[in-house]
Image (tube, rainbow, N blue to C red):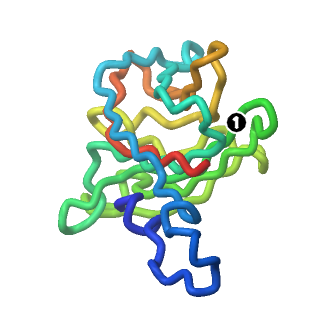
């Protein structure tokens, strides 16, 4: 999924004042490419592993799309998670996601979707697909955190359901929505 494509808007703004341009009415979101293949996450009861992704300071909400190494469909479709995260001060515990690429025992190309929501008391926000084997690490939580008077990050927590240390394998894109 390419986050930038569905966020493009039509250029027809006949209903608006002639002095209002498309860029003034529909600002294109900032897109941030991210990857992490070095975070070591301890197994439960340790962790969670924390990965902070730098955001523009004015970020209020982000759409994140993170994928793993696990192939879940013909044509090399990758497992992963897509969700929306907002600022912690007003929206803590409200992140909701859609995850693709569940249990590996279905078949070598088996996959299924699931919706996770912290507001509905989900323990995590993705399938267990974010390590090199694609069987143990899940996205546990995500929110926008202000870490200093001039710094804001998308804070992500990762949990390892395996029995040994696992390394996060994650690539994706963050679209700053507002």
- Residue occupying the point 36% across, 51% down: 104
Query: Which residue is pictured at 54% across the width and 57% down the height?
Result: 98
Which residue is farthest front? Answer: 19
Q: Which residue of the protein is positioned furthest toward the left in this rendering?
A: 75
Name the image quarter holding the N terminus: bottom left
The residue located at (65%, 51%) in the rendering is: 96
Q: Position of residue 153 (x, y in %)?
A: 55, 26
Locate residue 167: give its quadrant: top left
Task: Give the left or right position of residue 42, taking residue 110 as reference.
Answer: right
Percent x, y for residue 12?
49, 83
What is the residue that sits farthest to the right in this orientation? 90
| Residue 147 as seen in the image, left or right of residue 163 | right
Image vertical order of residue 38 relative to residue 161, above or below? above
List x then y, in percent, for residue 77. Answer: 27, 61
Mark 1 burial class by Cα count in 10 Å: few <14, some 14-19, many 20+: many
Between residues 1 and 90, which one lies in front from this camera angle? 90
From the viewer's perspective, tell me whether residue 37 is left or right of residue 153: left
- 38 up-or-down from 93: above or below: above
Question: Residue at coordinates 37% horizontally, 19% vertically from top-left?
Answer: 39
Q: Residue 147, how many percent across, how many down?
A: 63, 16
Q: How many numbered discs? A: 1
Foreground of the two, 75 or 54? 54
Q: In this view, does 102 lie above or below 158?
A: below
Find residue 149 and report its image quarter. Answer: top right
Q: According to the image, label 1 marks what residue? A: 87
Secondary structure of the residue carrying numbered label 1: loop
Q: In this view, does 118 lie to the left or right of 46?
A: right
């Amino acid at each position: 999924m390419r986050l930038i494509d569905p966020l493009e808007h039509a250029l027809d703004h006949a209903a608006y004042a002639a002095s209002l341009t498309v860029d003034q009415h529909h600002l294109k979101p900032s897109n941030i490419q991210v990857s992490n293949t070095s975070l070591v996450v301890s197994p439960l009861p340790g962790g969670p592993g924390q990965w902070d992704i730098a955001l523009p300071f004015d970020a209020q909400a982000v759409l994140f799309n993170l994928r793993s190494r696990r192939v879940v469909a013909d044509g090399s479709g990758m497992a992963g998670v897509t969700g929306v995260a907002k600022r912690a001060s007003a929206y803590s515990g409200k992140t909701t996601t859609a995850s693709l690429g569940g249990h590996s025992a279905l078949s070598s190309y088996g996959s299924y979707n699931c919706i996770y929501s912290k507001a509905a008391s989900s323990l995590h926000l993705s399938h267990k697909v974010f390590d090199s084997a694609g069987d143990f690490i899940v996205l546990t939580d995500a929110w926008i955190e202000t870490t200093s008077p001039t710094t804001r990050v998308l804070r992500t927590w990762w949990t390892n359901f395996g029995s040994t240390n696992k390394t996060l394998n994650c690539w994706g894109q963050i679209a700053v929505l507002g």
